[in-house]
Amino acid sequence: MSTILILLLILLEATAIWFAWRAISSARTSQGAVGWVVFLVTAPYLGVPLYLFLGHHKFSKYLTGRRNSEEVIEGIKTFREAHAPEVPTEFPSEALERISELPVVRGNNMRILIDGNETFDAIFEAIDAAQNYILVQFYIVHDDELGRVLRDRLIAAAKRSVTVRFMCDPVGSIKLPNTYLNELRAGGVRVVDPSQMRGPKNRFQLNFRNHRKTVVVDGTVGFTGGLNVGDEYMGRDPKFGDWRDTHVELRGPVVSQLQLVFVEDWHWATEEILIPDMNWEAGHMAENMSGLIVPTGPGDEMETGALFFFTAIANAKKRIWIASPYFVPDADVLTVLKHAALQGVDVRILVPEVIDHKIPWLAAFAYFDEIRHAGVQVWRYQSGFMHQKALVVDDTLAAIGTTNMDNRSFRLNFEAMAVFFDSRAAKATASMLEKDFERSFVLNKTLTQQPRHIRVGAPIARLFSPVL
């Protein structure tokens, strides 16, 4: 064996030991730490590359304006005082305010947008009516029919002297060709090149995806939810059939919060400070709903994505209905779901019957028996693929946004949920979900009664749950 090879093996083993120490000092559970240590030390040639991709769940270099800018901190304090709800919310909102580092504000309105047609009709109408600026951020953008319509609308706005800013995630939009981005730039749109973003610039960014979908126009109307920019989201892909998804149109002071999240992401990507250029006076809507944006991600000091779901479930008294394309919860969320059902709360989980990603789809079956035994109902949507991220608690809270009910959204992705503490919002969201239940069936089979590929695949797929 050559001297160079021996040195390489020593370096590999040293790296494995260093990573093992990092796993011991930073892993959330002892089981996770032991798993990484054993894997790294006994099989460093496999463990070291995988740890580079999957071993991190905190992104300490991501700085948020809410925590680190005196201007923003003071602005949020003033914002809270100017827009505080006139009466306390029925749902205890303090935990969600601490998670988001944003206050609950009054004077808002929300409009649920069901499916791609409703969503992009509303988004394109707002873009066409823009007077000053447009902020656009999606996880996935395709250069297909829908993607080209968005491109052309943004270029048309730029030609009207509207300032247009556009960014997408380097991993989610990895197939987006440079020609698409260059056409936007040539049309006057200010584009963040995914390959030139500050921070990780390659596939090692696997654990730190920006999964947010945000459109803000003139600081007065905003959109977020489950839909990305691609023809499949319009139901044009025969593999998935009708694509069931939900977005929400926002008006009122809550738009300023969604805008602040975009400004933070833009600053991270470009080091450009947009705060002075934005309109922060969205105005109050007659509907006067109280709400806030809950942004979560691996840059937060706490595991805010999981805490969001935990808080919603733990405070449910009559019902908690959750729609998510993936169901791979952590131990804490799994426990609070079972506890709520054992307390007599109507707990329903709506997931798709149609598959888009095989491993998380299989992993979900490894959890279903456990929650069903406690009284949780598992509903499987069968009219095409369901991709929405929505929940309703009692008659007091409704939330729609980008966060899936899985560990990736809990800890590894940057996400955002629009949350409303209002009986009208809860009623509208519950009505939407009731129609989805009509196109679904209640799962009654245990794992042992499933086909062989599910019986075998589910427990194996669950092994990957920390990164699903």
Image: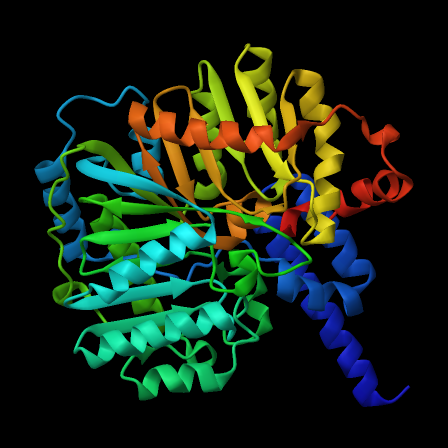
Q: Position of residue 275 (x, y in %)?
A: 17, 63
Judging depth in this view, the residue of 431 and 170 nearest the camera is 431
| Vertical side of 39 occupied by 33: above or below | above
Q: How are the colours assigned in the image?
A: rainbow
Can residue 298 be seen here?
no
Q: Position of residue 178 (x, y in %)?
A: 48, 85
| Vertical side of 193 occupied by 273: above or below | above
- At 46% from the left and 14% from the top, the residue drawn is 318
| Vertical side of 363 occupied by 70: above or below | below
Q: Position of residue 394 (x, y in %)?
A: 41, 19
- At 12% from the left and 65% from the top, the residue drawn is 276
Q: Quadrant of residue 312?
A: top left
Can residue 460 be seen here?
yes
Is 6 on the left or on the right of 423, as rendered?
A: right
Q: Quadrant of the N terminus?
A: bottom right
- At 23% from the left and 78% from the top, the residue drawn is 158
Q: Residue furthest top?
A: 344
Judging depth in this view, the residue of 393 and 424 nearest the camera is 424
- At 20% from the left and 63% from the top, the residue drawn is 129
Total marks shown come to 0
Q: Position of residue 262 (x, y in %)?
A: 31, 60
| Vertical side of 232 occupied by 435: above or below | above
Q: Quadrant of residue 108?
A: top left
Is 407 on the left or on the right of 11, as rendered?
A: left
Q: Quadrant of residue 184?
A: bottom left
